[in-house]
């Protein structure tokens, strides 16, 4: 059985599951994103549409609700649904680092796959997939059937933002890129240069939409933080992570774990 706890660390509250840090939350300043990859996800949120405009968001994976809190603070009035199957973890978070009143954040105790199927067409302006199981994205969330559900629930100009952890030769990224491209033709990616050069594993953010995604607006933010990173447009994504095929459920057994 998983061990869940919240510790005071790094000027905030850190959610740990089996000793692995899942989220960092600064109750005094929900716009402070301590984890580098989460800061990059915040950059994407900032680059969408009109600054500060509310959005309809779906989050697959919640833990400490760091990004939902960020979205609520930077885009007041946003309506957000979080799909988080770990009810004990959600109860711990609500007790120790409660969500702000009238945040617009609703948490549903359901896994991402089942939760997506239940959502209506065109429900989301933004869908964030940031779910973890033992440090990796559950592979069943990156298969072609699930990515088709992701595309279905997006509004015509909506975007999907996926956080995927992988290492060279990047079988998970290549398969996910192929699966996304089959249903959402416009792509961009954000990652550290060392990960792109296959020097070390890392988080690769994939941004996809039926309409063009804000590559340049995201790229403008990528060099301004303490940990600069690269933003790739669609052609660069194909050059770096092309050649894959969309995964079916049976294919994920051979992915790195």
Image (cartoon, grey):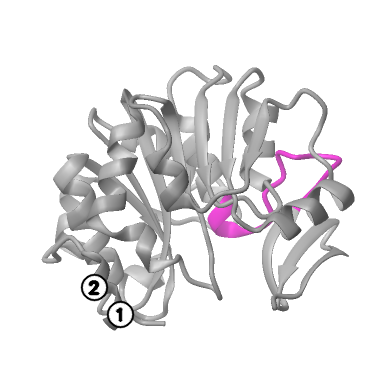
Label 2 sits on a secondary structure element that is helix
Q: How crowded is mark 2: few (under 14 residues within 10 Å), some or many (20 or more)?
A: few
Above or below, 21 relative to 41? below
Which label belongs to residue 253? Answer: 1
Label 1, residues with CA under 10 Å away: few <14, some 14-19, many ≥20: few
Residue 245 circle label: none
- Prevalent SS, magenta region: loop
- Visible in this render: residue 208? no
Task: Answer left or right for 39 relative to 213.
Answer: right
For disc 2, the marked residue is 250
In-front residue for pair 204/132? 132
Q: Give the range drawn in magenta.
A: 25-38
The residue at the point 75 percent across, 40 percent down is 30
Residue 19 sits inside the magenta stretch:
no
Q: Quadrant of residue 120?
A: top left
Dots 1 and 2: beta carbons under 8 Å?
yes
At a point 28% along the width and 37% down the height, the residue shown is 151
């Amino acid at each position: 059985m998983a061990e869940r706890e919240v510790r005071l660390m790094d000027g905030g509250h850190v959610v740990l599951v089996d000793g692995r840090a899942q989220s960092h939350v600064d109750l005094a300043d929900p716009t402070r994103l301590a984890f580098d990859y989460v800061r990059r996800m915040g950059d994407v949120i900032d680059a969408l549409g009109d600054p500060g405009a509310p959005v309809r968001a779906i989050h697959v994976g919640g833990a400490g609700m760091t990004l939902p809190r960020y979205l609520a603070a930077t885009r007041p009035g946003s309506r957000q649904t979080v799909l988080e199957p770990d009810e004990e973890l959600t109860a711990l978070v609500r007790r120790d680092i409660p969500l702000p009143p009238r945040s617009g954040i609703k948490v549903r105790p359901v896994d991402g796959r089942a939760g997506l199927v239940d959502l209506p067409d065109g429900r989301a302006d933004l869908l964030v997939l940031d779910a973890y199981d033992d440090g990796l994205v559950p592979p069943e969330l990156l298969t072609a059937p699930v990515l088709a559900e992701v595309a279905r629930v997006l509004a015509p100009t909506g975007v999907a933002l996926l956080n995927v952890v992988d290492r060279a030769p990047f079988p998970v990224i290549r398969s996910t890129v192929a699966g996304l491209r089959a249903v959402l033709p416009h792509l961009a990616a954000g990652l550290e240069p060392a990960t792109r050069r296959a020097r070390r594993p890392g988080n690769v953010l994939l941004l996809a939409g039926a309409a063009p995604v804000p590559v340049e607006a995201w790229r403008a933010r990528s060099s301004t933080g303490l940990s600069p990173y690269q933003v790739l447009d669609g052609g660069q994504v194909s050059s770096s992570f092309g050649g894959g095929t969309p995964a079916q459920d049976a294919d994920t057994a051979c992915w790195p774990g």
